[in-house]
Image: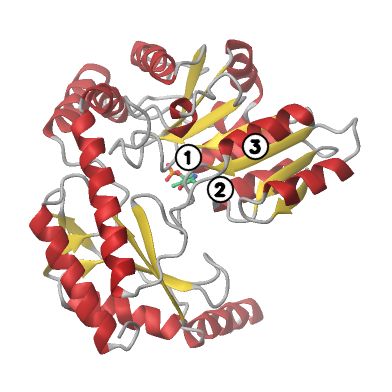
Amino acid sequence: MHSWEEQMKAELLHIEKKAQRRRLHSIDFLNNSSIIMNGRKLLNLASNNYLGLAGDDRLIEASIRAAREYGAGSTASRLIVGNYSLYEHVETELARWKGTEAALIFNSGYTANVGIISTLVGRNDLVFSDKWNHASIIDGIILSRAEMKRYQHNDLDHLETLLKKAPLHKRKLIVTDTVFSMDGDIAPLKGLVELKEKYGAILMVDEAHSSGVYGERGEGLIHDLRLQEQVDVQMGTFSKALGSFGAYVTGKQWLIDYFVNKMRSFIFTTALPPAVLGSILAAIHIVQQETARRKQLHEYSQYFRKKLSDLGFNIGTSVTQIVPVLIGSNELTVQFSERLQERGIAAVAIRPPTVPEGTARIRFSLMATLTKDELDWAINEIATIGQEMGIIS
Ligand SMILES: *Cc1c(COP(=O)(O)O)cnc(C)c1O
């Protein structure tokens, strides 16, 4: 055996010993609220399909129509011959929805973050990044070669201390998630805007979990707080509440032009397939019109959080549709998620290194298309397991 092979196998073993080994499970889609895993039907409390749009016939039909009209693949990058008219149509609607001058679509949230950050800053610059930001943001910072200054989670005072120390002439980027994906809490956007103005920094906000979920027409939290003029770079995805795939950035027209010219993860990749764009367009329309979905999601979220915390579970700082149950030990967390599965609920055990050591948790996420009975049934099951395992009394 080669030594590199031995090293990697030892590493896998080490991961296994720490109860951190991840495995792929084959899943079948049953409907918006349920999946089939290992031959069993599970209530899906693990997906990011918050509004239930992934299974919506209108998105599916729109995908089929776009594929019929434009083909299965887009055949090239957007700057070559992949820029079908459908793109411009979707980007115009997107900018109108978000209340910004212009918009640009990317292949995924991951490639968007990696590309945006490495385009905005370089070797001599500074990035101020919330400690709990998504991995794609961290990877963007690493790729940019800028110096990363991590500030304590949602801690404006700490951020300001770091900004104060930064040399005046350096370009500064502040970057944050709006809704944090493992805790379900929210960034202090107003305070971040004040600091970015005070210190002349660029502010970039990732709305992956809030686009479609907040705002009167689902514009996101930035728009809900009327900050769309102040946030320089609004990024978000179509892969979560919008039930499709891909990502976007919105902002000033010149900034979008700059990305088109400079962003490597935009330039050197094949454009999204037409079918995906078709479903994005349908989702943008539905998400603006069907406010009842959002209302239902928020009602369920509030109800679920209150029930779990009344039962004695530690749900941390969640105020959204993402509700963690903090357990601590990796082993117990994995056991908890296995028991949930046995009883018919899909919810993922989140362990380090995704979250800090000692804060392993079950991450529940809610969906507008669940029924109240399904939700109440799930809460009962969670309570029973929690009691059996001694996590609540
Ligand atoms: C999911 C997520 C992404 C990545 O988006 P994809 O479209 O899944 O690649 C980026 N940022 C945050 C905060 C996310 O939660």
Q: Amino acid under label 3?
A: Leu
Tell me if I can see residue 347 in this picture.
no
Which mark lies nearer to you, 2 or 3? 3
Farthest front residue? 310
Q: Give the CA distance from mark 2 to mark 3.
A: 20 Å
Q: Which badge, 2 or 3, is on the more N-terminal residue?
A: 2
Callout 3: SS: helix
Does 308 sit left or right of 378 as displayed?
right
Q: Amino acid under label 1?
A: Gly
Q: Which residue is mark 1?
A: 109
Q: Which badge, 3 or 1, is on the more N-terminal residue?
A: 1
Horizontal and vertical percent position of residue 201: 75, 31
- Are the two marked residues, 2 and 1, in contact with CB atoms closer than 8 angstroms? yes
Does 2 sit left or right of 317 as displayed?
right
Per the rendering, the mark at residue 192 is 3
Q: Give the CA distance from mark 2 to mark 1.
A: 8 Å
Displayed quadrant of residue 389: bottom left
What's the residue at 77%, 44% (across, down)?
160
